[in-house]
Image: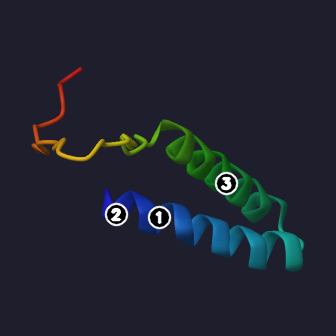
Amino acid sequence: MAVMDRAVRAGIRHGFRRGLLGGSQAWLAVGAVAVGVRAMQRLAARKPVVVTESLAPGEAILVRHLPPAEE
């Protein structure tokens, strides 16, 4: 995924510099697509599971790490 992230980052950077600031419509389109890809990546990212529990005196919890369920 690192190659994809670098490509999206470069698309946004070049799209902004060469498209928005430089006036190139092609680079502006590349930047817009890259921003759309980045937005989709963030929407599709898994959110961490956070649990908050109140414990009474003498109670305990057991924390285990299980592999994520395959979809």
Q: Are marks 1 and 3 in contact (CB under 8 Å)?
A: no
Separation of marks 1 and 2 at Cα, in angstroms: 6 Å
Q: Amino acid at mark 1?
A: Ala
Q: Amino acid at mark 2?
A: Val
Circle count = 3
Image-based side of 63 in relation to 46, left or right: left
* Label 1 Cα neighbours within 10 Å, binned few <14 / some 14-19 / many ≥20: few
**Picture coordinates of residue 41 (x, y %)?**
50, 45
Separation of marks 1 and 3 at Cα, in angstroms: 11 Å
* Label 2 Cα neighbours within 10 Å, binned few <14 / some 14-19 / many ≥20: few
Q: Amino acid at mark 3?
A: Val
Image-based side of 23 in relation to 60, left or right: right
Q: Nearer the viewer, residue 5 or 50?
A: 50
Separation of marks 2 and 3 at Cα, in angstroms: 16 Å
| Outermost residue, front side | 57
The answer to which of marks 1 and 3 sits earlier in the sequence is 1
Residue for point 66% across, 46% down: 36
Which residue is disc 2 drawn over? Answer: 3
Residue for point 25% across, 47% down: 57
Q: Nearer the viewer, residue 43 or 56?
A: 56
SS category of the residue bearing label 2: helix
Mark carried by residue 48: none
The quadrant of the image that shows the C terminus is top left
**Picture coordinates of residue 9 (x, y %)?**
54, 68
Q: Nearer the viewer, residue 50 or 13?
A: 50
Which residue is disc 1 drawn over? Answer: 7
SS category of the residue bearing label 3: helix
Is residue 22 visible in the rendered image? The answer is no
The quadrant of the image that shows the N terminus is bottom left
Q: Are marks 1 and 2 in contact (CB under 8 Å)?
A: yes
The answer to which of marks 2 and 3 sits earlier in the sequence is 2
Which residue is disc 3 drawn over? Answer: 35
